[in-house]
Amino acid sequence: MGAVEGKIIRMKDFQTPTGPLPVAWLEVAGRKEVAVPLIRLAEAVGLHPNPFRSLVQRDLVLQEFQTTITVVSGGLKRTQTFLLRPGVLGALVKISTRRIQDPAKRERIVQFQRWAFKTLDLILFEGEEALPRPQPLFPEAGRAAPAYMPTRGDRALATRMLVGEIRRPGGHLYSYSEISRLTGVARTTLRRLAKRLGVAHLRWPYTPPAQGDDRELLNLLLAQQVQVLQRMLKSMAR
């Protein structure tokens, strides 16, 4: 059995522990169903769309809950692939979190799984007013953020990652790209914030190595600090 056919009734963004996610109400075979764009679902759990799409294509049952819909926008037609609610839940179950070494990435998937298992059924059967308030991806990072920071993304968590309070496995600092992906805060905002916090030199012009011991990381950070001090001395001597 191939992918089912359906048409969009309406769409709405819902706030999840990993950021906003569009959810569509579809009419499928004469009944109403909720669905999620496949690519956006992959982004929500922090996976690349291609392997996530392959995960669905390899499973004969999950294929039955996939639908491709033609959307017209600005006079242009484009197709978008959706997973119906049972397919979303089935795909999430097939993700083995035990094999994921990165604790932040593993926690991201677990939190989204919990949200999806509870929320998608409520959206379909009980309505939006029954939805629980989503919990942050890292509840322990719920401190008040500085007033100058934007409202988008988990700002408190981003701050802790920037200053090195939360690090990658092995003790290495998270890069701007990784922090942006995990917290939802834009990279340009992260760079400005790093300058205000006085930690921009930790990630510029070099990036900490992905592998190696703490001694290598310490030597690199010390070398970067020396470069910053030399620039400051030259500037003061002018």
Image (cartoon, helix red, strand yellow):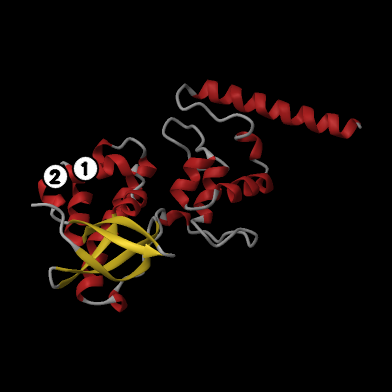
Q: Residues within 10 Å of mark 2 (few under 14, many from 20)?
A: few
Say which element carries label 1. helix
User: Which quadrant would residue 74 be assigned to in this image?
Assistant: bottom left
Which one is nearer the viewer's eye here, 119 or 76?
A: 76
User: Which quadrant would residue 84 be assigned to in this image?
Assistant: bottom left
Q: As displayed, is residue 130 above or below residue 136?
A: below
Residue where numbered disc 2 is placed: 59
Q: As displayed, is residue 61 above or below residue 21?
A: above
Spatial distance from mark 2 to mark 1, Cα to Cα? 7 Å
Q: x, y (%) of residue 23? A: 31, 65
Say which element carries label 2. loop
Q: Residue at x 38, y 66 (%)?
A: 13
Which one is nearer the viewer's eye here, 136 or 91?
A: 91
Task: Look at the numbered discs 2 and 1 and tell me whether their residues touch, using CB distance below 8 Å.
Answer: yes
Q: Residue at x 36, y 49 (%)?
A: 43
Q: x, y (%) of residue 124? A: 22, 72
Q: Residue at x 47, y 22 (%)?
A: 213
Q: Is residue 149 left or right of residue 130?
A: right
Q: x, y (%) of residue 112? A: 31, 55
Q: Which numbered dot is residue 34?
A: none
Q: Is residue 209 left or right of residue 116?
A: right
Q: Determine if residue 96 is in view.
A: no
Q: Amino acid at mark 2?
A: Asp
Q: Residue at x 60, y 24 (%)?
A: 220
Q: Residues within 10 Å of mark 1 (few under 14, many from 20)?
A: some
User: Which quadrant would residue 47 be assigned to in this image?
Assistant: top left
Residue where numbered disc 1 is placed: 55
Q: Determine if residue 118 is in view.
A: yes
Q: Quadrant of the C terminus?
A: top right
